[in-house]
């Protein structure tokens, strides 16, 4: 059985903790590797290596840092197919979804290539006689990223590209469910010329995470994952004096107004609800059908679902893969079992689909007549289940979304520009799509939800990422009185 090691100080380091976790192929259900689960001592070794590297990395020139990011970008681009396969075999998403993930991750590396521009400070000349004030941005030191299973390449790239480019050194604690792709990225970073110790990986579970949260030499923690863990990371990390950004779960609603193009809305709902088997924090999980939109929309979505091919990533025709684990697949299915008793109508039941016999597959499902208070509405299901809530008015739709505990993404489908503009004003959600179902911001904006989808106030990547991974130093300077200077400039002095 292949074992997946840590990556510390530029080299593979086998785990010595004596604890391991299984890594499955979700499309077959077979275990394909074990991953070492780090002890406190193993995390400490990674932090020591990162701390030593920080000494020289922070003084490495901006042009050298950006040159390494450009080379890394090139290597990732050349290895797209291999990376997509690595994602697919451990996560289960089909290669086209994996390629999409990688494309969105790559944007963040491209953004970080512009680090010389991004780190420019401010300068105010002559704030007082002979006095200038300027601000510079400096890295924080050793920073850590803790990432979820569902985007094993993209979410780490959201973090480490900017963190490293800013001059920090980085410890990644990837999801123990699909750890291999991050190991390949570490190899590519080394090939791109990144010095040993600047980027480290420790695999692990709560033991490793807790050590990251209380290690005195870690200055900041970036987290993406479920809401209960995000809350824990934020409260523990900040209590330990660290800078923390913690992104949590989601329940994304898509409003369809009666004037919307129903075919366009149905196509969008299907790709946004079932892509990556619904295991996306920006997946649409509730369609809010306003007035007369409901019947034609439910019919249009239901008509599309039997055509969606579910299968392993090795099947070139498959459009949707399995769920991450057997336990998660069964949990998602339990929402379908519970819905009728709560008064909802299961229009298409993924448990009855014709599916591969091995692996953690569940077919696509559609539940109509869903209401707040039902489990399938209140909870983040994180699977290929789309709920439909029917409401009478735009106002009712907006109130519904604003009252939900999550506020990651949302979308409105309409032909009315005024209604769309009003929606972006009214809605208490961090990322809004107008006729766009998954409004993940491009890398030169920043990503972040509201309410239980984000703890603290730091969004991820883009300009917010540069802010998060640097601290400003403001310098007020006065030079000696020129009257005492022996140099005759031939001009009147400014004081
Ligand atoms: P998770 O919270 O179970 O795990 C995330 C990370 O936390 C992993 O590295 C895991 O090892 C670690 N972890 C798990 N339990 C822990 C514990 N008790 N103590 C300390 N660390 C622990 O999330 P997941 O299942 O890997 O990912 C899916 C979740 O992530 C969903 O809720 C999804 O919405 C969310 N997510 C959010 C975003 C976003 O941008 N807001 C993006 C992707 C995923």
Image (cartoon, rainbow, N blue to C red):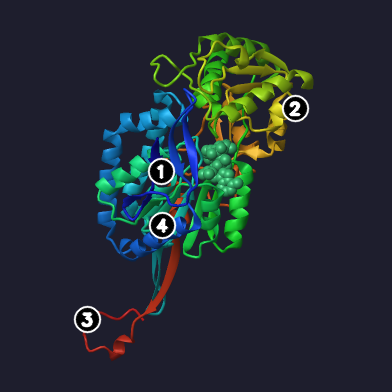
Residue 409 got which mark? none
| Residues at marks 2 and 3 touching, judged by CB atoms closer than 8 Å | no
| Residue 462 located left or right of residue 484 | right
Q: Which residue is mark 4?
A: 46
| Residue 288 located left or right of residue 129 | right
Image spot of residue 329 (x, y percent):
59, 26
State which tag comes first along the sequence, 3 or 1.
1
* Distance Cα–Cα, label 3 vs label 4: 54 Å
Disc 3 or disc 1, which is closer to the eye?
A: 1
* Distance Cα–Cα, label 1 vs label 4: 19 Å
Q: Which residue is mark 2?
A: 374
What residue is shown at x 39% (from left), y 45% (from top)? Answer: 5
Q: Element at badge 1?
A: helix
Compared to 98, does 161 lie above or below?
A: below
State which tag comes first along the sequence, 4 or 2.
4
Mark 4 neighbour class, 10 Å CA radius: few under 14, some 14 to 19, many 20 or more: many
* Distance Cα–Cα, label 3 vs label 1: 51 Å
Q: Is residue 186 visible?
A: yes
Foreground residue among 9 and 124 = 9
Q: Element at badge 3?
A: loop
* Quarter assignment of residue 376: top right
């Amino acid at each position: 059985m292949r074992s997946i090691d840590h990556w510390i100080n530029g080299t593979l380091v086998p785990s010595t903790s004596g604890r391991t976790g299984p890594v499955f192929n979700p499309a077959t259900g077979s275990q394909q590797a074990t991953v070492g689960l780090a002890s406190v001592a193993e995390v400490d070794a990674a932090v020591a290596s990162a701390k030593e590297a920080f000494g020289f990395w922070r003084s490495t020139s901006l042009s050298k840092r950006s040159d390494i990011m450009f080379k890394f970008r090139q290597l990732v681009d050349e290895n797209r197919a291999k990376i997509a396969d690595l994602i697919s075999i451990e996560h289960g998403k089909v290669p086209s979804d994996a390629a999409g993930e990688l494309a969105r991750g790559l944007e963040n590396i491209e953004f970080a290539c512009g680090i010389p521009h991004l780190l420019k400070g401010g300068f105010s000349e002559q704030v007082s006689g002979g006095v200038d004030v300027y601000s510079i941005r400096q890295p924080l030191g050793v920073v850590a990223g803790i990432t979820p299973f569902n985007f094993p390449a993209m979410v780490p790239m959201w973090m480490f590209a900017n963190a490293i480019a800013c001059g920090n050194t980085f410890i990644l604690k990837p999801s123990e469910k699909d750890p291999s792709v991050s190991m390949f990225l570490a190899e590519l970073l080394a090939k791109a010329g990144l010095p040993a110790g600047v980027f480290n990986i420790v695999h692990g579970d709560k033991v490793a995470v807790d050590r990251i949260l209380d290690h005195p030499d870690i200055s900041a923690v970036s987290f993406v994952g479920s809401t209960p863990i995000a809350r824990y990371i934020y409260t523990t990390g900040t209590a330990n004096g660290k800078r923390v950004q913690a992104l949590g779960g989601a329940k994304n609603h898509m409003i369809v107004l009666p004037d919307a193009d129903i075919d366009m809305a149905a196509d969008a709902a299907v790709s946004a609800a079932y892509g990556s088997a619904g295991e996306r924090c920006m997946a649409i999980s509730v369609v809010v059908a306003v007035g007369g939109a409901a019947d034609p929309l439910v019919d249009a979505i239901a008509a599309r679902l039997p055509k969606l091919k579910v299968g392993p990533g090795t099947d070139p025709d498959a459009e949707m893969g399995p769920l991450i684990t057997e336990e998660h697949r069964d949990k998602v299915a339990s929402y379908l079992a519970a819905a009728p008793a709560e008064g909802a109508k299961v229009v298409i039941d993924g448990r009855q689909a014709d599916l591969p016999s091995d692996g953690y597959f569940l077919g696509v499902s559609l539940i109509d007549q869903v209401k707040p208070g039902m489990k399938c509405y209140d909870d983040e299901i994180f699977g290929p289940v789309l709920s439909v809530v029917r409401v009478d008015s735009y106002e009712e739709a907006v109130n519904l979304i604003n009252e939900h505990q999550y506020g990651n993404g949302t979308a409105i489908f309409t032909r009315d520009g005024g209604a769309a503009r009003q929606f972006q004003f009214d809605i208490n959600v961090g990322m809004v799509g107008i006729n766009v179902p998954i409004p993940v911001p491009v890398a030169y904006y920043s990503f972040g939800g509201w309410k239980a989808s984000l703890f603290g106030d730091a969004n991820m990547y883009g300009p917010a990422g540069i802010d998060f991974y640097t601290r400003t130093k403001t310098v007020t300077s006065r030079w000696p009185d020129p009257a005492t200077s022996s140099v005759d400039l031939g001009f009147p002095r400014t004081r």
